[in-house]
Amino acid sequence: MDNRGQWESRTSFVLAAIGSAIGLGNIWRFPYICANNGGGAFLVAFLVALATAGIPILIMELSMGHKFQKAASGTMASIKPKFEILGWIVVGIAFIITTYYAAVMSWAFKYLWDAFSLAWGENTSDFFYKDTLGLTSGPLDFGGIKISLLIGLVLTWISIVACIWKGPETVGKVVYATVFIPWIILIILVIRGVTLEGASVGLLYYLKPTFSKLLEGKVWLAAYTQVFFSLSIGFAIMFAYGSYLPKKTELVTNAYIVALGDSLTAFFGGLAVFGALGYLSTQTGTPITELKASGPGLAFVVYPMIINQLPMLNTLFGILFFLMLLTLGIDSAFSLVEGVAAAIRDKFGWSHKATNIGTAAVGFTFGLLFISGAGLYWLDIIDYFMNFFGLALACLIECIVIGWIFKTTNVMKHVNAMPGFKIGKVWEIMIKFVAPVILSALLLTEIIARIKAPYEGYPRAAELMGASVMFVIIPVAAFIMTNAKAKTESETPD
Ligand code: PHE
């Protein structure tokens, strides 16, 4: 297909893929998932997950997209027409994640505005939960929508659509700014975070593994799904990005660069957050293990606190930090939208612009739930189901379909015909055996745990509503697939 567009250069591809991978997942999601799952123990599990599933799957997705020159659903259909539905389920998960991802970005927009006057004051926790979100008593008490977040959400969606207006051409340029700026700011905040009084308490919790924690299945599932979320795999993205790569390209090397850049950023961001948690724990006399359970609000409470503690230029750093969060988030967000939009375009042959605007309009509407007074609860519940079940299952199925049915040897043939690093037996064993066995075991354990008790003590009704999103995606996927059949069949297969 000649009309797919291609990355202008390898650098723009690597930057776009890194840009997709590095996002709120590293600075917002990683710290609280890590804090809630044993700190240092989680880090160990994270590294294992990266080696046994993250990197092998990343290589696989990029290569499959590259080989078939199609987005996720098209690639799956090329393996077996019936599998197209799997591609669409993945697209569905990506779409739902986009809706709450955009909501987190709307918080960041609001905070960017607040940073000009350091409006969060000393009590950054109350400022976030009460003033910013207007958090209600529970997920079934919806409260209202704060106008500032609504404006933030509108701005978020406008920025996303602007970035992907013309596909890879625009993306390739935007990423130069969105990848480098954040790193510089992050380094400064880390330095301040780790030099705060009492920081060592937090850092110790972060860096010293408690091995007994590693016996908990939950910690491992959290680690695997955080790796998937963070590397942007198991969604539709890396297939689409791979499909834009030039004919001859170092597939494996690119994958390593993306994985390394992404994990280092998360690890680094963690240093700042845990340093600040240590500070907080010393100031308030609350043990760190009790502080940790701040969930998705953690970054928005802790970073303003670090910013308050900077010796000078606090306002400037406040502005820079939230600008950073936005630049980090935006390229991930548009990669999510692009993954969804590319699949729709390939299937229905709609124009770039119409698809982007359509996706944004629906995404915005769904996002309203997450900026309501109960938004934080829903974000937590839906994120849990999308990642712990949706994403883990998607990666598991992907390993089976591509590893066993399409066959690893076919992937290897394609990858090893490219320049740069090659893949061999180790990769094959990970995809065919290690990753599927571990993921199945973890999923099973988590399903049993959920049957026994609801997630985080939320009401059962809310939990079931969260879970049902998963089940809605499947019929929608089937509907899209069958309704667009006529079109696909009339096309000449390539
Ligand atoms: N990887 C992104 C992050 O860490 C999130 C994301 C997930 C982006 C899936 C695209 C696809 O924030």
Image: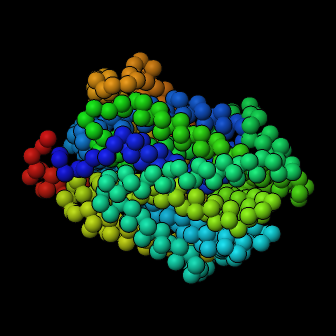
Residue sitting at x 42%, y 64%: 160
As drawn, 242 above or below 315: above
Q: Residue furthest right?
A: 285
Residue sitting at x 79%, y 69%: 123
Q: Nearer the viewer, residue 448 or 410?
A: 410
Q: Looking at the picture, how far across and down is residue 441, in whole percent?
A: 53, 34
Q: Nearer the viewer, residue 171 or 221?
A: 171
Q: Looking at the picture, how far across and down is residue 338, in whole percent?
A: 35, 56
Residue 78 sits in quarter: top left
As drawn, 330 above or below 85: below
The C terminus - image quarter: top left
Q: Nearer the viewer, residue 319 or 472?
A: 319
Q: Looking at the picture, how far across and down is residue 281, in whole percent?
A: 85, 53
Residue sitting at x 67%, y 39%: 42
Identify the colour scheme used. rainbow
Q: Looking at the picture, how far across and down is residue 480, in whole percent?
A: 26, 58
Q: Can residue 308 be spotted in the picture?
A: yes
Residue 492 appears left or right of 407:
left
Residue sitting at x 58%, y 63%: 323
Residue 3 appears left or right of 261:
left
